[in-house]
């Protein structure tokens, strides 16, 4: 009797451990109608494709699947497909079977500085993490990056009930509109209050705010980021400090809620649960059922953030169901891993960067005033000239997992990118500057040396073009993004400094 009941308990436990987030939502009577993740399967039986990548060398695409049913993504398959070139995430597949895939977001009411109105795709290797020790890639989204689906199946419309969660990088955000995941307008235009219901994460203070200086999880319901019943301050909506964040927004007629928790440990907390906003248009809601990632409903695309996984449900999930989902996320054991690779570029060392393109192998990254360029440097150059091509490696000003490069002839000034040109500037006290001065050295794209990736724009690398320094993306809109010679122009031999 004792033996058989303990056997029963272990079988039940095995079933519980094996269940994915969407199995849990199904058991709770609120099934997933969209399930997106580049890191893992969200159903225990899921073996299909998680996402598609497109590579710069030949525009070929491949699908990345989990290593096993219900398992972690096959990051090694991506690494081998993308070796010696660049890759972007072109599709994030819907695992629910409803075909609610996310693809490059089309033009909308707000298109920012984009060339043809389409948002950018995310670098495929910008957000490496491990899940239970196995490497996988999240979706690191720079300003201008966005994914969308305007023709969905099964997503809530009108005042129908829905739930959603997203696992995000709680340290990657900004104050622009709007890093969202969830329900939005099918037209990509602002069609009025209550036409959206999405998770927002960041430090926007244009509408609602929470306690402290943020970042906050809020609900984007269109023409308002809400932390509570008004677009004012709701002190119960706490600032987020976790590296891995579980964010929840859910809504049903007359009621909605915000919850958050550490995706790597512990339980969720409720930051708001109550009445719809006290402004016309939000009760009842007029949800339209498109799905957005990384942008606002009208395609507002100034925000940044990192997405690992998320779902949308049919029906208002119970707190018990969400607690089980959070336990499942914690059990996936999200953890950080190195952002750098290739030859060591050590903090405290003094370095030079030699170009590897055949034209230019005697040229080094130097600066003339604020302008970063490449110049020939030899022992015959004056010591001032040698110093202008010499850099001290310091811990990354915006992220200590990467590095910054201080000019040896101008202590206190660093290489940073601005409008994708490299400049040598002194910090201006902004978070933006520290991020724009942070770079992650990785194994050289052409197979030698190192490529120097912009931390905040991981599809962009140090490049020389007409002897001027840029952060360039392979095949991007600017002349300096030209695919010809991209791999060589973005690969550098990092050697000892001249002085
Ligand atoms: C990839 O596709 C883009 C857009 O159609 C095109 O401009 C580019 O030349 C293509 N690149 C290669 C290597 O085929
Ligand atoms: C590009 O780099 C490769 C690998 O180092 C080298 O073999 C090739 O000659 C270079 N080509 C040009 C045009 O720089
Ligand atoms: C080094 O000297 C050469 C020859 O005069 C010059 O062209 C080059 O710009 C100098 N390098 C630097 C970093 O000033």
Image (cartoon, grey):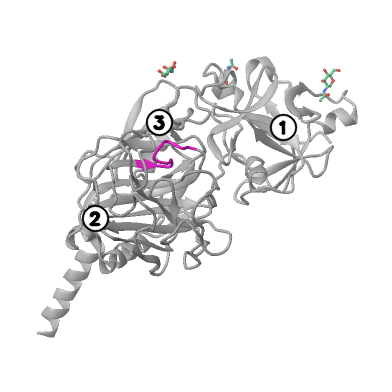
Q: Please say if 1 is above or below 306.
A: below
**Secondary structure type for disc 1:** strand
Badge number at residue 161: 2
Q: Is 352 colored magenta in this rendering? A: no
Q: Please say if 67 is above or below 388.
A: below
Residue 325, given in percent of the width and then of the height, sits at: 30, 62
Q: Which residue is mark 3?
A: 108
Residue occupying the point 18% across, 58% down: 26
Residue 33, given in percent of the width and then of the height, sits at: 22, 48
Q: Are marks 2 and 1 in contact (CB under 8 Å)?
A: no
Q: Quadrant of ligand 3?
A: top right
The region drawn magenta spans 292-301
Badge number at residue 423: 1
Q: Residues within 10 Å of mark 3 (few under 14, many from 20)?
A: many
Q: Is residue 107 left or right of residue 4?
A: right
Q: Residues within 10 Å of mark 2 (few under 14, many from 20)?
A: many
Disc 2 to disc 1, how far (Cα)? 50 Å
Residue occupying the point 81% across, 33% down: 498
Quadrant containing the C terminus is top right
Q: Is 300 colored magenta in this rendering? A: yes
Disc 3 to disc 1, how far (Cα)? 33 Å
């Amino acid at each position: 009797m004792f033996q058989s009941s303990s056997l029963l308990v272990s079988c039940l436990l095995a079933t519980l451990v094996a269940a994915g987030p969407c199995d849990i939502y199904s058991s709770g009577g609120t099934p997933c109608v969209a399930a997106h993740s580049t890191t893992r399967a969200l159903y225990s039986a899921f073996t299909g494709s998680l996402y598609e990548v497109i590579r710069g060398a030949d525009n070929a695409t491949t699908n990345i699947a989990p290593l096993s049913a219900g398992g972690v993504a096959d990051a090694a398959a991506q690494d081998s497909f993308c070796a010696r070139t660049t890759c972007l995430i072109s599709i994030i597949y819907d695992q629910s079977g409803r075909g609610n895939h996310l693809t490059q977001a089309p033009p909308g009411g707000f298109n920012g500085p984009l060339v043809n109105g389409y948002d950018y795709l995310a670098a495929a290797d910008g957000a490496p993490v491990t899940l239970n020790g196995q490497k996988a890639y999240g979706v690191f989204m720079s300003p201008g990056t966005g994914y969308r689906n305007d023709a969905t199946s099964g997503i809530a419309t009108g005042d129908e009930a829905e739930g959603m969660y997203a696992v995000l990088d709680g340290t990657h955000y900004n104050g622009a509109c709007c890093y969202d995941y969830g329900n939005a307008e099918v037209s990509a235009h602002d069609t009025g209050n209550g036409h959206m219901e999405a998770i927002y994460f960041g430090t926007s203070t244009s509408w609602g705010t929470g306690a402290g200086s943020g970042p906050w999880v809020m609900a984007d319901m269109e023409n308002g980021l809400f932390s509570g019943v008004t677009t004012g301050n709701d002190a119960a909506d706490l600032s987020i400090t976790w590296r891995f964040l579980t964010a929840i927004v859910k809504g049903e007629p007359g009621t909605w809620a915000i919850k958050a928790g550490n995706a790597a440990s512990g339980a969720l907390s409720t930051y708001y649960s109550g009445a719809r906003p006290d402004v016309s248009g939000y009760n009842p809601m007029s949800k339209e059922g498109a799905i957005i990632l990384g942008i606002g409903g009208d395609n507002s695309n100034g925000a940044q953030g990192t997405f690992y996984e998320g779902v949308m449900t049919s029906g208002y999930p119970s707190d018990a169901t969400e607690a089980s989902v959070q336990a499942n996320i914690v059990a996936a054991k999200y953890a950080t891993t190195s952002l750098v690779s290739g030859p060591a570029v050590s903090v405290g060392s003094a370095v030079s960067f030699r170009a590897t393109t055949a034209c230019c192998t005697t040229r080094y990254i130097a600066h003339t005033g604020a302008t970063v360029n490449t110049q020939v440097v030899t022992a015959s150059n004056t010591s001032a000239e040698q110093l202008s091509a010499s850099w001290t490696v310091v811990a990354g000003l915006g992220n200590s997992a990467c590095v910054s490069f201080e000019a040896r002839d101008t202590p206190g000034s660093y290489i940073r990118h601005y409008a994708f040109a490299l400049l040598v500037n002194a910090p201006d006290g902004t978070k933006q500057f520290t991020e724009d001065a942070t770079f992650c050295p990785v194994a050289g794209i052409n197979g030698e040396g190192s490529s120097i990736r912009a931390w905040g724009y991981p599809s962009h690398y140090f490049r020389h073009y007409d002897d001027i320094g840029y952060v360039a993306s392979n095949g991007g809109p600017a002349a300096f993004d030209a695919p010809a010679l991209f791999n060589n122009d973005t690969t550098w031999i990092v050697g000892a400094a001249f002085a």
